[in-house]
Amino acid sequence: MINKIEKSIFLIVLIQIFLLMNMNVAQSYQIYQTDKINNKEKNIQKTNNKNLINVGINLLIGIFSIKQIGVVSAIEVPTNTLNEDSIWNCCPQTTNGAICQDIFSDSEITCAKEILPTKCENVLECKSGCCFDSVEGLCTTNSPKITCENENGIWYDEETCAIQECQRECCVLENDAQFITEARCDYISLIQGVEKDFRAGLTESECLAISATQDIGACIFEQEICRIRTEQACLSDNGDFFRNYLCSHPDLETNCTKQNSTGCVKAKDEIYWFDSCGNRENVYSSDRNQSWNNGMILNKENSCNPDSSNAGSETCGNCNYYSGSMCSKTNETETHILDG
């Protein structure tokens, strides 16, 4: 019985020893198989990546091998390869009325006249000159030949119109004088039905002074200098006349400030405002806005208290000698106006 038990125990021990010896081998094999699978997957991934890169490279090579597709870059084109006549055409007049248009050879602009195979600067019809209107006597400088002829003018190859037909002289028509061409003088004389008096040898200022009046206004000279003058005196001095304007009017853009001081004027009864340039303005009134009259000359009849002598008034300088008052200097103890 004991021998049987011992044999059984011995058999079990042998089995356990066998298992212990083979379990490490089996586990090592399992680890090996797992590593083998992982390495295979990595190799597959590397292969796929390599294939993807190869496909991308082949695709780019294919794209750039197409002749119509290339890298855009700025290159210098040899000047001898450009032909102006082949690039540009001249359209003397388009269907919408535009004159002398330089267009590309393949332009779709609709031309009303025959297209010329060159730039417009080389076309006589597009050259600038002087256009003389023989009917109205007017001259237009820098006029394209085609424009002039379309308007029935006479074209001259002289851009500044320094031609005899465009010389201006003095045209006197009754009480009006203008510095214009003789043909223009004839035209105005005809439509107004008055006799012309065409005077040569006068300057423009001398001509305009013939019909100038004794009206008063602002006379502007160079550098925006302003003086109150009659129209005749202003034009005789080559000034620009602005009838009924004060020199302090904002539209004239002078440096004269309104109502800077008060004082008397020789041979005048009234007290006047003066601007900062020393020019006489309107009759004094303590109501400055009413007296300034928006920068326009205000006559005596429309100034303050025109029907009163205003003797001793502190607010109105509209004096009248025949009513017993006139402008004069005063001392501190005498009655004087509020602003002077």
Image (cartoon, rainbow, N blue to C red):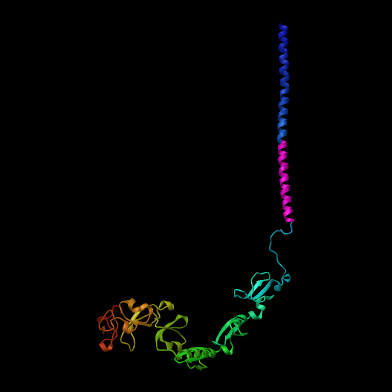
Measuring from the top left, give residue 4's x and y in whole percent. 72, 8
Q: Is 63 part of what is drawn in magenta?
A: yes
Residue 85, above or below 322: above
Q: Which residues are magenta?
A: 39-65
The answer to which image quadrant residue 11 occupies is top right
In the displayed structure, does residue 185 sit left or right of residue 77?
left
Measuring from the top left, give residue 169's x and y in whole percent. 52, 90
In the displayed structure, does residue 266 sit left or right of residue 25?
left
Residue 109, above or below 62: below
Residue 234, above or below 256: below
Query: Which residue, as the protein is rendered here, is positioned at the far top?
Result: 1
Measuring from the top left, give residue 229's x and y in whole percent. 41, 86
In the displayed structure, does residue 303 sit left or right of residue 225?
left
Q: Residue at x 71, y 15 (%)?
A: 13
Q: Nearer the viewer, residue 103 or 18?
A: 103
Q: Residue at x 33, y 77 (%)?
A: 290
The N terminus, quarter of image: top right
Q: Residue at x 72, y 11 (%)?
A: 8
What's the magenta bit mostly, secondary-structure-wise?
helix
Q: Is 159 part of what is drawn in magenta?
A: no
The answer to which image quadrant residue 155 occupies is bottom right
In this rendering, the count of numbered labels is: 0
The C terminus, quarter of image: bottom left
Q: Nearer the viewer, residue 69 or 74?
A: 69
The answer to which image quadrant residue 247 occupies is bottom left
Q: Nearer the viewer, residue 182 or 4?
A: 182
Q: Nearer the viewer, residue 101 or 141?
A: 101
Measuring from the top left, give residue 165's x and y in whole percent. 57, 89
The answer to whether residue 9 is visible is yes
Residue 19, above or below 318: above
The answer to whether residue 259 is visible is no
